[in-house]
Image (cartoon, rainbow, N blue to C red):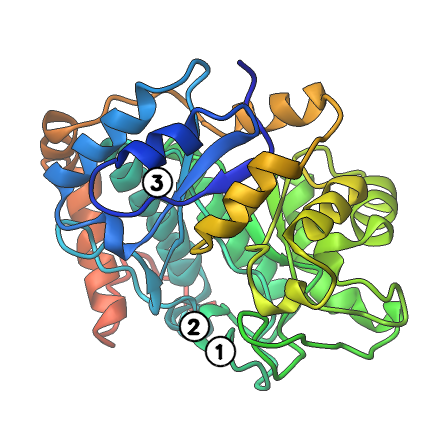
Amino acid sequence: MPLGCLMVDVAGKSLLPEDRDVLLHPLVGGVILFARNFSDEAQLCALLREIRALRTPRLLIAVDHEGGRVQRFRTDFTRVPSMRQIGHAYDLHQSTGRALARQVGWIIGSELKSAGIDLAFAPVVDLDLGVSEVIGDRSFHKDPDVVATLAGALAAGMREAGMCATAKHFPGHGAVVLDSHVALPIDRRAYADLVGDLTPYRRLMMNGLESVMMAHVVFPDIDQLPASLSHRWVNDILRGEMNFQGAVFTDDLSMAGAAAFGDIVTRATLSLEAGCDMLPVCNARASVIQLLDSLNPAPRPVSALRIARMHGRAHAFGTEASVTLRASATWQAARVALDQCRDGRPVLTLDGDAS
């Protein structure tokens, strides 16, 4: 059974019968986990074994694990600093900041892969323009070139760990005040004024970026639909002008930024027609059931292949893999650097570069 286009959540720390029925539906291709699904690493590994055993090819398992405010698993995992803290480290010492970003990506990827997670939705490449309620310290910096540099280093670290990167929120969420979780943000800039927001994406794509997540933000100069539902943004600009060949995720279709554009089936249909590959629908089981009953997409073999590739490199997982990882010198050095950054202490530098 190929992977379907929906990414859904599950109720708790183990699978309920209804969860199993939903995950076995051919329209489902992925699972996104939240803090409610986690108590410790041993429990998480057990849940992931349940999910992995359900399907072949197995479902894609993802989590929001950026660091800072957005990190679903904390006990038994390294607390990752906010991206703004990495940006501050870069301002003080560029080579140290780049190295730290790569270590962050590596430790995110390594720890999650060792637990059995396929994908972290990171890095955030929105610019920190000082206005967004929801982005804030999730952004590396206000300078597009710095964001591109640090996001590229973080993505390289994830790739080194065997995990694909997902840059978000395309084409940019940093210039609007409203939070798309609870409202519909509108960015009234002309397309020509979005050069800075698009710069990190262009740079990351030149270096093999595997996926992007679309923003629930309307840019009326380009389209009256939010980017996540827009054929103009996904097909014409992202796929066409920018020649992006990787996977395209929407942001959660149950969010208010998408809800103004029809019921859940209408939103999902618009996203698929726009060219998105996978549609997360979170914390809305009734909407998921409605989609399973009513959504009838045409076969999408290219999308299924793109999603299958997001599993990244095969990796041993479980308690033994986790113990081996944490005994490694690479993990211990990265942990020291991340703790120093997160706690506001100067990060140790071993070279003479003060750039």
**Residue 160's x, y, as percent?**
40, 33
In the rendered image, which residue does mark 1 sit on?
A: 136
Q: CA distance from mark 2 to mark 3?
A: 19 Å
Q: Amino acid at mark 2?
A: Arg
Q: CB atoms at circles 2 and 1 under 8 Å apart? A: yes
Q: Which mark sits nearer the N-terminus, 2 or 1?
A: 2
Check whether the beta carbons of the residues at disc 2 and disc 3 lie within 8 A of each other: no
Q: Is residue 117 visible?
A: no
**Mark 2 vs 3, N-terminal side:** 2
Residue indicated by mark 3: 109
- How crowded pointer 2 is (Cα within 10 Å; few <14, some 14-19, many 20+) is rated as some
The disc label shown at residue 31, or none? none
Residue mark closest to the camera, 2 vs 1: 1
Q: Bin the neighbour count of mark 1 within 10 Å (Cα to Cα): few under 14, some 14-19, many 20 and up.
A: some
Q: Quarter-wise, where is residue 85 in the image?
A: bottom left
Q: Nearer the viewer, residue 181 or 73?
A: 181
Left or right of 285: which side holds 234? right
The percent position of residue 36, horizontal first and vertical second, equals 25, 55
Which residue occupies 30% across, 18% down? 53
Residue topped by disc 2:
84
Which amino acid lies under the numbered mark 3 shown in the image of this protein? Answer: Gly
Give the class, few, some or many, for how many residues have Cα within 10 Å of label 3's Cα (few <14, many ≥20). Answer: many
Q: CA distance from mark 2 to mark 1?
A: 8 Å
> At numbered mark 2, what does the secondary structure look like: helix, strand or loop?
helix
Mark 1 or mark 3: whose residue is earlier in sequence: 3
Asked whether, in this view, residue 270 is left or right of residue 17, the answer is right
Look at label 1 and name its amino acid: Gly
Where is 72 relative to 309, above or below? below
In screen coordinates, is 158 left or right of 310?
left
